[in-house]
Image (cartoon, helix red, strand yellow):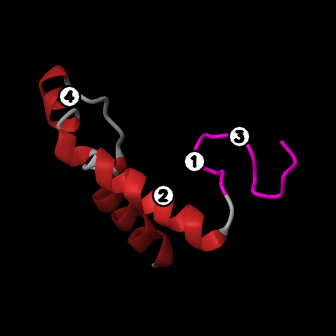
Amino acid sequence: MKKSWLVVFAVVLLPGCAIRPVEAWEKGNLAKPAMRFDADPLDAKFTQHTYTSREAASGGTGVGGGGCGCN
């Protein structure tokens, strides 16, 4: 009985997990500025400056150094 429910579960739900490539007409939607993690570059730079000033450390965002003076 349990195996039949497992088979039904697998047949119904697993096809929804199929990974398909992004089509050419969908790439335009992914390239929009609203899809960026930091939509406003100036705001992102200001936030990073505020974080660096509060924590007295830098790094972790692509620049060298960790705040300890050992470059």
Instruction: Examine the rendered structure and indicate whether residue 59 appears above or below residue 23.
Output: below
- Residue drawn at (34%, 65%), measured in percent from left and top? 8
Instruction: Examine the rendered structure and indicate whether residue 42 appears above or below residue 55.
Output: above
Q: Comparing marks 4 and 3, which lies closer to the viewer?
A: 3
Q: Nearer the viewer, residue 9 or 70?
A: 70
Q: CA distance from mark 3 to mark 2?
A: 15 Å
Q: Amino acid at mark 4?
A: Lys
Q: Comparing marks 4 and 1, which lies closer to the viewer?
A: 1
Q: Are circles 1 and 2 on residues that touch, CB within 8 Å? A: yes
Q: CA distance from mark 1 to mark 2?
A: 9 Å
| Badge 4 or badge 1: first in the primary sequence | 4
Task: Identify the element where label 4 is drawn.
Answer: helix
Residue at label 2? 48
Q: Comparing marks 1 and 2, which lies closer to the viewer?
A: 2
Residue 11: quadrant of the picture? bottom left
Residue at label 1? 61
Residue at label 4? 27
Q: Are circles 2 and 4 on residues that touch, CB within 8 Å? A: no
Residue most extreme to the top: 24
Q: Residues within 10 Å of mark 1 (few under 14, many from 20)?
A: few
Where is the C terminus found, in terms of image quarters? top right
The kind of secondary structure the magenta stretch mainly shows is loop
Residue 33: quadrant of the picture? top left
Q: CA distance from mark 2 to mark 4?
A: 29 Å
Q: Amino acid at mark 1?
A: Thr
Q: Amino acid at mark 3?
A: Gly
